[in-house]
């Protein structure tokens, strides 16, 4: 603390005394107005308890990464051979090319940049962008398509694959549905307000439904105010630049979502990355920022903002929130928490990782989340102090220039929130939250007992199953579909090159029979494709990963 005060960083005095520090008055610029100076009364802080972490990141046998690298090497060699054949006209080239008439122009793109897509992604492209023709609930109907030119183009057969078990959608609480009396309110709002607004919130697009929704979100999260946006991705990418700018420092987890990364880059702030969930790495960066200040000038940073996610969508891991809150308090930094995958999905009443770890929501400076997962809708929100929300209404590009959220979408979120909070007079919402937790723990435990390597927290509804080798990614997804199971497979560049995986997203709408059907097929598939790489004894849970065991590089 003494070092922090000696460093004289702008705005820290406000946190200690409640009085505004330098640059936080009414005339402060965007980089200094995350926390305006106006004081207000708050209740005593609720101390959070240390929840035991139970996360696994088991490493495979050494031969697995070796064979994975060899697989990519073979694919690369064949890619160069096929490019040579295309260049000499021995094989037809389906990829985009510059016209011959423009050969003297500056090229619009470098051909080699598409090497990976042209020679690897295309080979397994049939496993993505599959057309669905029903409600994407626990099961869905799929339009069958085939390719006659190795996935460069597709043609539809006219056949519909019925009742495919959906193991890939973010439909955590099962609100992506078309049945139920509560949906009548969405239909009524559509008839009353129409499907779109055709204006921004600051012009003619501020409806009573938006105000009702924001009030309900703030009540749900236990904060002063909230603001909603029509697009979840833009909630991050367009609001972070309004909170920080030049002269500010962003400390970002290495596994943060692209929307957070883009928002950080657009802000113009200095960005430093810390190792995933590694408190030693984060504290080292915080200490260095406090002691040394900005490069060259060594002036104090205007603001230090920590960017983390509640649940990381590719790893299924949970943020170590209580410890990060302690660090941000110790070094007087600000904390931006993205709860896109955790809000509604974890916590005793679905209020995300803040509730899961019993953290006071007032200890999180910026609460962000989306409505695209647990609420069966679209859009996102920013929540926190009223001064923060009022500031974003005036300075956020997503608020000033983007069209308002469509009224039917707002009503869908309202009905989902009321159901979760029990304001509809039923216990359906809380039952779904609990059922999701039961399904997630059961599915993850059974996968580990079957000998698969999985990543993440035991309470996370995102369950990655490691496949590693590129040849197994396409084969796995195709054979699962033949068994009427829809899965999402993920590889490079969304994951490290040697950690291709299948990502299962559990839902409260999944029945035990559905999960057992999927598990039985996975057991069969694991033996057929040989990706049961776990070296843990059958039926024994891997030890919890409590703290990284590697040294922090200087």
Image (spheres, rainbow, N blue to C red):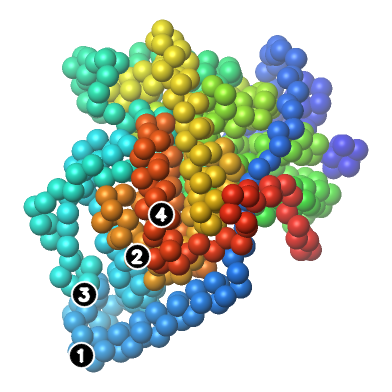
Q: Nearer the viewer, mark 4 or mark 1?
A: 4
Q: Nearer the viewer, mark 2 or mark 1?
A: 2
Q: CA distance from mark 2 to mark 1?
A: 27 Å
Q: CA distance from mark 4 to mark 1?
A: 41 Å
Question: Dot 1 surroundings within 10 Å: few (below 14), some, or many (20 or more)?
Answer: few
Q: Is 530 left, or right, of 243 in this rendering?
A: left
Q: Which numbered disc, 4 or 2, marks the residue that appears first in the sequence?
A: 2
What is the residue that sits farthest to the front in this orientation?
538
Return the mark for residue 522: 4
Return the mark for residue 474: 2
Question: Quick one: SS at disc 2?
Answer: helix
Q: Nearer the viewer, mark 3 or mark 2?
A: 2
Q: Position of residue 178 (x, y in %)?
A: 24, 27
Return the mark for residue 90: 1
Q: CA distance from mark 4 to mark 2?
A: 15 Å
Quarter of the image that includes the N terminus: top right
């Amino acid at each position: 603390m003494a070092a922090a005060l000696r460093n004289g960083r702008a705005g820290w005095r406000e946190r200690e005394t409640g009085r505004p520090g330098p640059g936080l008055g009414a005339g402060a610029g965007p980089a200094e107005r995350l926390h305006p100076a106006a004081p207000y009364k708050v209740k005593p802080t609720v101390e959070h308890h240390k929840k035991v972490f139970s996360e696994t990141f088991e490493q495979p046998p050494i031969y697995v990464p070796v064979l994975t690298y060899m697989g990519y090497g073979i694919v690369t060699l064949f890619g160069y051979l096929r490019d040579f054949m295309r260049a000499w006209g021995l094989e037809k080239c389906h990829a985009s090319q510059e016209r011959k008439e423009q050969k003297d122009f500056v090229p619009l793109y470098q051909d080699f940049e598409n090497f990976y897509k042209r020679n690897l992604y295309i080979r397994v492209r049939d496993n993505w962008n599959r057309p669905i023709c029903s409600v994407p609930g626990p099961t869905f109907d799929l339009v069958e398509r085939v390719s006659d030119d190795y996935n460069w183009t597709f043609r539809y057969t006219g056949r519909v694959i019925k009742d495919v078990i959906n193991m890939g959608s973010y439909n955590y609480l099962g609100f992506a549905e078309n049945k139920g009396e509560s949906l009548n309110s969405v239909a009524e709002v559509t008839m009353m307000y129409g499907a779109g607004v055709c204006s921004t919130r600051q012009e003619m697009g501020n409806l009573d439904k938006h105000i009702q929704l924001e009030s309900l979100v703030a009540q749900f999260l236990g904060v002063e105010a909230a603001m909603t946006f029509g697009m979840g991705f833009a909630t991050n990418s367009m609001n972070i630049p309004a909170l920080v700018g030049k002269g500010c420092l962003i400390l970002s987890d290495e596994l943060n979502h692209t929307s957070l990364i883009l928002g950080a880059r657009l802000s113009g702030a200095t960005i430093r990355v810390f190792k995933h969930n590694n408190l030693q790495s984060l504290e080292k960066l915080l200490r260095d920022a406090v002691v040394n200040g900005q490069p060259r000038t060594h002036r104090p940073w205007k603001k230090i903002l920590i960017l983390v996610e509640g649940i990381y969508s590719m790893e299924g891991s949970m943020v170590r929130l209580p410890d990060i809150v302690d660090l941000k308090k110790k070094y007087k930094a600000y904390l931006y928490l993205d709860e896109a995958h955790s809000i509604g999905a974890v916590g005793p009443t679905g209020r995300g990782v803040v509730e899961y770890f019993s953290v006071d929501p007032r200890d999180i400076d910026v609460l962000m989340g989306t409505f695209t997962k647990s609420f069966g809708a679209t859009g996102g929100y920013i929540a926190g102090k009223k001064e923060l929300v009022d500031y974003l209404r005036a300075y956020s590009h997503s608020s000033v220039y983007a069209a308002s959220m469509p009224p039917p979408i707002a009503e869908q979120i309202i009905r989902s929130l009321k159901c979760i909070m029990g304001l509809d007079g039923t216990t359906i919402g809380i039952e779904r939250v609990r059922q999701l937790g039961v399904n997630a723990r059961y599915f993850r435990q059974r996968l580990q007992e079957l000998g698969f390597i999985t990543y993440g927290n035991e309470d996370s509804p995102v369950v990655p199953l490691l496949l590693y080798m590129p040849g197994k990614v396409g084969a796995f997804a195709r054979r699962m579909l033949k068994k009427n199971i829809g899965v999402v497979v993920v590889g490079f560049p969304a994951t490290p090159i040697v950690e291709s995986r299948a990502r299962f997203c559990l839902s409260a709408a999944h029945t035990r029979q559905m999960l057992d059907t999927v598990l039985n097929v996975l057991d069969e598939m694991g033996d057929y494709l040989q990706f049961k790489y776990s070296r843990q004894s059958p039926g024994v849970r891997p030890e919890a990963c409590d703290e990284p065991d590697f040294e922090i590089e200087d």
